[in-house]
Image (cartoon, rainbow, N blue to C red):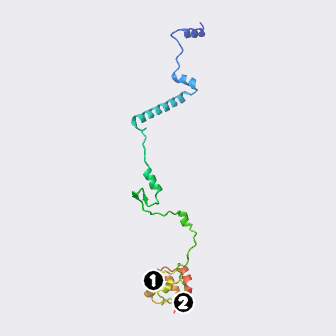
């Protein structure tokens, strides 16, 4: 007999049938997904269902709505610059209600009348060996501390013999010395 005839006979026999297709193969034929894609989708579906179940089990009252009353905080915010809020709470007025840019960019005309001016001495008008603190402060770039240092140096070393000795005083460098030497003389 021929092999094809045996196949026909076997197919028609009630106990011998084609093997049943598994669930993945049926779904694959219907959807067009591969077996691996179906397994991944099933895994994600199982994880999602487990997560939703745990959320329901662990937090049964999570859907309860909480009503917050922010009216006190809102009134404090809106009335921050005022001295009294709701007649109960007093807030000190510690900050200015001025825009900081306006403060920096103040275009009012400055008042220079109150400005202190130091009158610069005439050339060769201050004797370095007899000058006191007030007369040394009149020199450009010399403040009270540097003037005291000059006087202390003079007391310690004796009278100045040349103007270049001022460079030995701490706080007087070449630049400052060149600015003040035209006002000084030594007798």
Q: Examine the image and state in which quarter residue 140 appears.
A: bottom right
Note whether 65 is above or below 122 in the view shown. Answer: above
Q: Which mark is residue 125?
A: 2
Q: Residue at x 46, y 55 (%)?
A: 77
Task: Describe the element under mark 1 as helix, strand or loop.
Answer: helix
Where is the N terminus found, in terms of image quarters?
A: top right
- Tell which of 3 and 72 is nearer to you: 72
Tell me the crowding category of disc 1: few under 14, some 14 to 19, or many 20 or more residues within 10 angstroms, Cα based. some
Q: Residue at x 43, y 52 (%)?
A: 72
Residue 6 placement (x, y as % from top left):
57, 9
Residue 123 placement (x, y as % from top left):
57, 88
Residue 145 placement (x, y as % from top left):
46, 80
Give the residue number, with chain letter if any, for mark 1.
148
Task: Describe the element under mark 2 as helix, strand or loop.
Answer: loop
Marks 1 and 2, the one that precedes in the sequence: 2
Residue furthest out toward the bottom? 187
Residue 78 placement (x, y as % from top left):
47, 55
Q: Which mark is residue 80?
A: none
Residue 182 horizontal side relative to residue 58, left or right = right
């Amino acid at each position: 007999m021929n092999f094809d005839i045996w196949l026909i006979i076997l197919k028609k026999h009630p106990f011998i049938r084609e093997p049943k297709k598994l669930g993945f193969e049926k779904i694959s034929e219907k959807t067009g997904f591969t077996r691996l894609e179906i397994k991944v989708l099933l895994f994600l579906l199982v994880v999602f269902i487990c997560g939703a179940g745990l959320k329901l089990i662990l937090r049964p009252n999570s859907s309860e709505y909480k009503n917050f009353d922010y009216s006190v905080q809102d009134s404090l915010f809106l009335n921050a610059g005022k001295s009294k809020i709701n007649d109960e709470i007093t807030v000190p007025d510690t900050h200015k209600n001025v825009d900081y840019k306006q403060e920096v960019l103040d275009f009012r005309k400055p008042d220079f009348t109150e400005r202190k001016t130091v009158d610069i001495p005439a050339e060769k008008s201050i004797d370095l060996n007899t000058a006191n603190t007030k007369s040394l402060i009149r020199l450009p770039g010399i403040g009270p501390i540097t003037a005291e240092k000059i006087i202390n140096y003079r007391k310690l070393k004796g009278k100045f013999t040349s103007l270049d000795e001022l460079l030995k005083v701490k706080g007087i460098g070449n630049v400052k010395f060149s600015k003040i030497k035209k006002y000084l003389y030594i007798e």
